[in-house]
Amino acid sequence: MDEEPGADVQGPHSRLRDPAWQVCPRARWLWAIQGGLWAAVLVAGQVGWWFLDRRGPRDPHLVVALISGVLIVAYLVVMPRWRFRVHRWEVSATAVYTQSGWLSRERRIAPISRIQTVDLTRGPAAQALRLATVRVTTASAAGPLVIEGLDQHDAVALVESLTAVAAAERGDAT
């Protein structure tokens, strides 16, 4: 048996490929800001630990602070670049494709006929960077497809396009 698994479904020369479009390069800054906020919470916890723990030597505090500092800097330098290389999206005539993650990757594909809602969100950091997130909700138990880090004009155009395509689709969206 020389056929690849799924060859009968996709055809013998079909290959699952990465979605075509990357998110906006400014998304790296958004992810760095979000990571920095989590780092600030971690640092605040360590500062609280420093002031509340008065009973012994300070060496454990210094070791944890040094290790945390190195890990935080590495995280804030590596994570946004890595995520930017992974996060991709594409819309075809029949489906919406997303790929996201950085330590583990998730690829989602939803048929246009299954789209129930299309949402556009922009938090404070995203607004400052002129970015937006598009959420495509289907009947899937896995939740919505999320495209984070789109240029706000591209996101608005995508939402309008998907809304028009989904409204014209004769499927039952379930």
Image: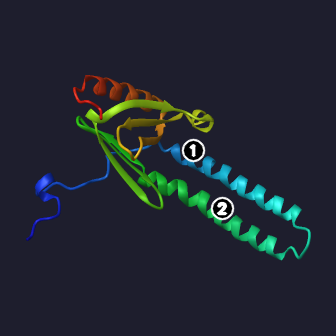
What residue do we see at 15% from left, 64% from top? 4
Q: Can you give x and y, in whole percent of width and height, for residue 140 in the image?
A: 35, 42
Give how far apart the Cα atoms at labels 1 and 2 are.
16 Å
Q: Is residue 99 left or right of residue 44?
A: left
Q: Is residue 1 left or right of residue 40?
A: left
Front-most of residues 78 and 89: 89
Task: Say above or below: 24 vs 117.
Answer: below
Residue under label 1: 30
Q: Amino acid at mark 1?
A: Leu
What residue do we see at 16% from left, 54% from top? 14
Q: Is residue 101 left or right of residue 63?
A: left
Q: If the image is split into quadrants, where does the C terminus sit?
A: top left
Q: Which mark is residue 100?
A: none
Q: Can you give x and y, in whole percent of width and height, for residue 159 in the image?
A: 40, 28
Residue under label 2: 72
Q: Between disc 1 and disc 2, whose residue precedes?
A: 1
Indicate the quadrant where residue 43 lies.
Answer: bottom right
What residue do we see at 61% from left, 57% from top? 76
Element type at marker 1? helix
Element type at marker 2? helix
